[in-house]
Image: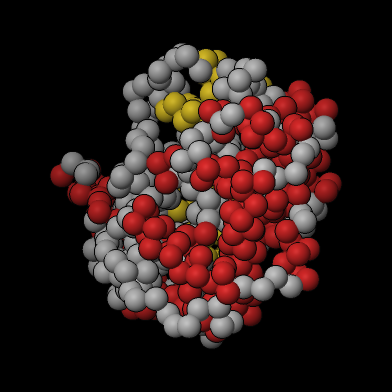
Amino acid sequence: MKERGVLLAVSSLPSPWGVGDFGAAAYDWIDLLAENGVDLWQILPLNPVGYGNSPYQPYSSFALDEIYLSPEPFVAAGLLPKLPEPFLADAARVDYPRVRAYKEQWLRQAWRAFRPDASFEAFAREKQALQYAVFRAMKRAYQGACWTKWPAPHRDWPLRGVPAPEVAYEEVSYQLFLQFFAMRQWQDVRDHARARGVKILGDLPFYVGLDSSDVWAARENFLLDPNGDPKFVAGVPPDYFSPTGQRWGNPIYDWEALERGGFSFWISRFAFCASLYDVVRIDHFRAFDTYWKIPASCPTAVEGEWVEAPGARLLQTVQSELPQLRLVAEDLGGLRPEVGELRDRFRLQGMKVLQFSLDFSGRYARDTQAALEWTVAYTGTHDNATLREWVEGLSPAQRRKLRRWLKKQGLSQGGTVERLVEYTLASPAQTAVVPAADLLGLPASARMNTPGTVGSPNWEYRARSFAGLPAALRRFFGARA
């Protein structure tokens, strides 16, 4: 049975407190999806965002960003006397530093009122939770500096196996409190989605950030020098998005060490995602086949080499350990045939993006209809222009060709953007997902990210309200019978 979904980051949900969160709007959004026959809610990674506020440069693969915490459950639990005053409620973009500073005021107030119980004490003993809490406490103690710049005792804390630094005990407790309630609030949201028949399609970044508890606590999994700095960094060579390629800066995995350890780091990452989502999209799937290895000394991604990864052995281990986990492979871009063979061998759904595939004469470039069926079809993703921006960027001749082709498909009513959404949802793909911005026909200001660029306005778009979305959902999806 065909699945249809909507892509909307949690951070983009409307909220009285400057950023989308795990509060009332998340429940209202799920209800809207359920009432209109939407099967999937696709989100971006929930991990704590790091450099450039990017969810693909996370501080940890095993933690959630505390910015998504809602005050409503704290009030209900008696940890806050009342809801905080609205803050940047009508802002069209997330001001991460200001929102974090504002939320920290009442989060610390709730923490001071909290009395640990048995469930919290059990959570606090979990290795990954404790490591992340110590990592964040140390970052605060050193004014946000990367762990490679900390004094040796704290930089090497995971290697020594000593107790948490005494100076950080209170902050460690606070960070554990944040994670305990972030996990609880998100699981409540997910339970509501399950009750309404809506699956969560989450995201697993392929790489992790250097400035993360992942690397700090398990540096043997990465190609680092004795100081902890990367010898090589990740990215992609020159492509559609950038003439100098994309130098992401993430450290490269030491695949030999990972394989000797039974890929335990990756198994843990997949298992954590399975605890949060119903379906997991693997970002940059092609790197399971070959990855672009850039010397850390190079300022761009032009210099580098393709290196083979043990993707087949890893995926075989993942499917053996987590047989019920459903995966989607982000297999976009110019790929060698082996990437498709790897995807198909493990029966993973691929992706097709309309903006990349449509050639203005009505064909999907290089693909047959049969090849499209076991895919997830998109009008665009978080890395694309909004559909309206894309259409407006076409030449007049291209737009004319596109309109003629849409008419041949029997799509003659409505604007070009609307008809492209209808075409995608009716495609032969087993699953079709449309960004909320495309359902509303929003302009370039609603774009989430421009690959190859860092910082504002990337990752900042947020909706002020759900205005227009109920009507758009009814039009494109229709009420559930």
Q: Is 471 placed above or below 236 here?
A: below
State whether residue 369 appears in this view: no
Point out the residue furthest to the front here.
Answer: 167
Q: Quadrant of residue 60?
A: top right
Q: Residue at x 76, y 54 (%)?
A: 126
Q: Is residue 387 left or right of residue 38?
A: left
Q: Is residue 153 left or right of residue 7?
A: right
The answer, for residue 155, to whether it is visible in the render is: yes
The residue lying at 34 percent from left, 35 percent from top is 453
Q: Position of residue 177 (x, y in %)?
A: 62, 63
Q: 328 and 277: which one is in front?
A: 277
Looking at the image, residue 403 sits to the left or right of residue 36; the answer is: left
- Going 59% across and 54% down the picture, which residue do you hit? 171
Q: Nearer the viewer, residue 117 or 31?
A: 117
**Side of 254 where 135 appears, left or right:** left
In the depicted structure, whether residue 102 falls above or below residue 37: above
Query: In the depicted view, which residue is nearer to us: 400 or 118?
Result: 118
Q: Position of residue 322 (x, y in %)?
A: 79, 52
Residue at (64%, 58%) from the top-left corner? 173
Residue 306 in the image: state x and y as whole percent: 57, 19
x then y, percent, for residue 32: 45, 78
Determine whether 40 is above or below 195 in the image: above
Placement of 263 over or under 222, stated as above or below: below
In the rendered image, which quarter contains the N terminus? bottom right
Report the number of numbered marks: 0
Q: Quadrant of the C terminus?
A: bottom right
State the residue in front, 29 or 35: 29
